[in-house]
Amino acid sequence: MPRDFDQEFSQDLEFKIAGESFKMRYVRPEVLASWEDESVSDKSEDAIKKIDERIKLFLDQSNGSGERWDSLRVREENPVTMGQLNAVLMWMVEVQSGRPTPPPSPSAPGRGKTAASSGAA
C-alpha cells in the first residue's frame, strides 16, 4: 500500500479565538520562505500589523474570514491578546512546516569570554 501523505498530514485546521471560529488553509512553502528576507521593524505597532498580515495569509478565505479577523482585532471587548496572536501564528507555522517552532534559547548573563581574552590564547 502506498504511503498516503494526504492522510498523514490531515488534521483539523479550525480554531476558535475570542469567541470567533476560523479555519486555516495551507499555503505554498515559498510564503514561509519569503519571511526570512523581510526586515523587522523596531516599532511594536508595525510588528503587530505584520503578525496580523501573516495570520490572514493562512486564513481560509471563505465566509469573509479576512474581514471577520479585522473586526475581531479592533474590538475593545474581549480583545485578542498579544499572547494569543503569537500562539495562533506559531501554531499556523508549525502546522504548515510540519515541525514545532523552537523556543528562544536562554542567553548567558554578562559577556562571554573569547579565546583572545582568555589566558589560553
Image (cartoon, rainbow, N blue to C red):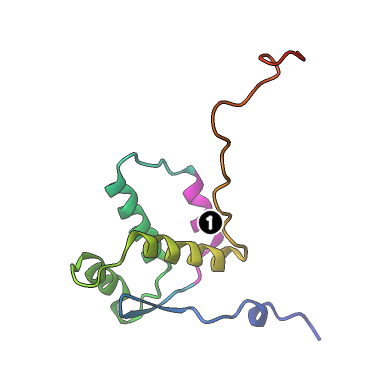
Magenta highlight on residue 63? no
Residue found 35% across the figure and 41% down from its top: 41
Determine which quarter of the picture holds residue 78: bottom left
Question: Is label 1 in a helix, a strand or a loop?
Answer: helix
Amino acid type, callout 1: Glu
Image coordinates of residue 104 in percent, x first then y, are: 54, 49
Main SS of the magenta part reads helix
Determine which quarter of the picture holds residue 59: bottom left
Image coordinates of residue 30 in percent, x first then y, are: 53, 56
- Mark 1 burial class by Cα count in 10 Å: few <14, some 14-19, many 20+: few
Q: Give 53 or 42, whichever is nearer the viewer.
A: 42
What residue is shown with label 1?
Answer: 30
Q: Measured along the vertical axis of the image, is residue 39 above or below residue 94?
A: above
Question: Quadrant location of the C terminus?
Answer: top right
| Left or right: 63, with 7 as reference point | left
Image coordinates of residue 95 in percent, x first then y, are: 55, 69
Question: Quadrant location of the N terminus?
Answer: bottom right
Magenta highlight on residue 30? yes
Residue found 37% across the figure and 62% down from its top: 85
Residue found farthest to the right? 1
Q: Give 82 or 50, whichever is nearer the viewer.
A: 82
What range is drawn magenta here?
Answer: 26-36
Residue found 76% across the figure and 80% down from its top: 3
Residue found farthest to the bottom? 1
